[in-house]
Image: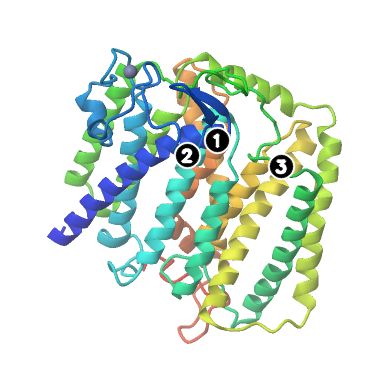
Amino acid sequence: MELSNGVIAFFMFVLGCCIGSFLNSLIWRLPLAGRRITFRGRTGPLTLHWPPSHCPHCHAAVRWQHNIPVWSWLALRGRCADCPNPISIRYPLVELGTGLTFLGLYLAYFVTGWYGTAFAFPERGFVTLIVDLFMCGGLLAISAIDADWFEIPLVIPGLMALVALGSIFWGLQPRLPSLATTSYLGRFAAKFTIGGTVGSLVSIFWIYWRSPAPACGEQTALTSPPASGAGTDAAEVPTPRVHGRVGVILGITVLLVLLLIASWIFLSGKTASLFTLIAGLLLFLLGVLPTSGQPVETLAEEVFEETAVPSARLEMLKESLLLLPPLVLAVAAMAAPIPLPAAEWCQRLFGVLLGALLGGGIVWCARIGGTLAFGRVAMGMGDIYLMAAIGAVLGWPMVWIVFFLAPFLALAWAAVWKLMGRSNVLPYGPWLSVAAILILLLGPPITHWYRLQLFPPAPPHAAPLLAPPAGGSGG
Ligand SMILES: [Zn+2]
């Protein structure tokens, strides 16, 4: 690795740890935002910046020298600086996990060549890196909030989709989705996208017109917070989740870090960068998924009961009517003579929108189909918005793989949990999120393989039917 690469890699790791520190704050504050609390004599709504970061036990403010990601927790030996109470190991794990995720992605794109030579820092692919890191940050926050509350705050997938849309003005980027309208099939797909997008907006407008803006995207309206039990006029500041078994978690963390170092010594750079990303995700999940404690199990049972409403099938039949506007308009648009500009940004726009339609559409169909089959609300509305945002960033060739990879990850984790004798009722958001981040690296080999099956190699002069995203074949 060249020196400049090493310096940027170190910067990426530190940046990730700092973003992780911000995520810690977001994970605690976002679901509680607006709740009236009393903190040191002042009563007001909880916001993203009030009350200031403080010890949950003695309410002492955290000083800047105790707010350095990962390091401060180690230096203070996991305890508050002002009282003998422990500070949850979730904080350093979220910071370290985010740091390694950012580092792994940078190394894979720019140093070890997951996408061949499509990336070259900083002139090629820098925008892709920013969009992807933004998605990673958003997905990690969603994973933690979904694990705590069984809800997905819609503002995060909304911002992810906006960043993906904003990136279309930077021209054709490596990996970011695009849809060439030069071929017959491409023009059909673009028209389908236009109709489907307009129809989806109609359906979303209808949902919000019928039941104005819930703050979070789950079907189940939770009335009580999981951790604190505080009411709406709480006199107490709600405390963040505390995890038990610090020793075991610390042991696993040290083992993972040692394995990570060994992978960079003994394995190829490509494999080691993938392992860096995986280690980051594992540490993050270890920090945020419940390892013990009553609240989440009570909450899980509550959600479980609420999703088993007797009228679930009937409600879902009504909801399936909302699929009609996008479907009808998409088919109508395919038959309509719509002029399609061939500008680069238009191709990128179609790529982003088609990915969002496909991502949201798969989950929506699974939600309706699953509920009709089992008589229990299968997936939350939040998962639909989440997958639409993932699709906007990943694009149509990769988003559907996320949907099929997620259950395997969830099952693997549940199996390990079962062996350890723990409850395995978990929300689905974290698995969709982690699968999406993994697909950033695992996607190219998979899409390359299935494209070869669908479109066997054509003579070299023939134009491909659907242009792959630039550099998407892994060189
Ligand atoms: Zn304290």
Residue at left 53%, top 76%? 345
Of all residues, the one furthest to the bottom in this rendering is: 461
- Ligand 1 is found in which quarter of the picture? top left
Residue assigned mark 1: 33
Nearest-to-viewer mark from 2 and 3: 2
Circle on res. 48: 2
Residue type for callout 3: Arg
Tell me which label, 1 or 3, sits earlier in the chain: 1
Residue annotated with mark 3:
367
Question: Can residue 197 be seen here?
Answer: yes
Place of residue 223 in the rendered image (x, y in percent of width and height, measured from the top left): 67, 25
Identified by mark 2, the residue type is: Leu
CA separation, marks 1 and 3?
Answer: 29 Å
Q: Can residue 2 be seen in this view?
A: no
- Residue at 76 percent across and 26 percent down: it is 308
Q: Is mark 3 on a helix, strand or loop?
A: helix
Residue in front for this viewpoint, 119 or 92: 92
Q: Crowdedness of circle 3 by 10 Å Cα count: few (<14), some, many (20+)?
A: many
Specify whether 440 is left or right of 204. Answer: left
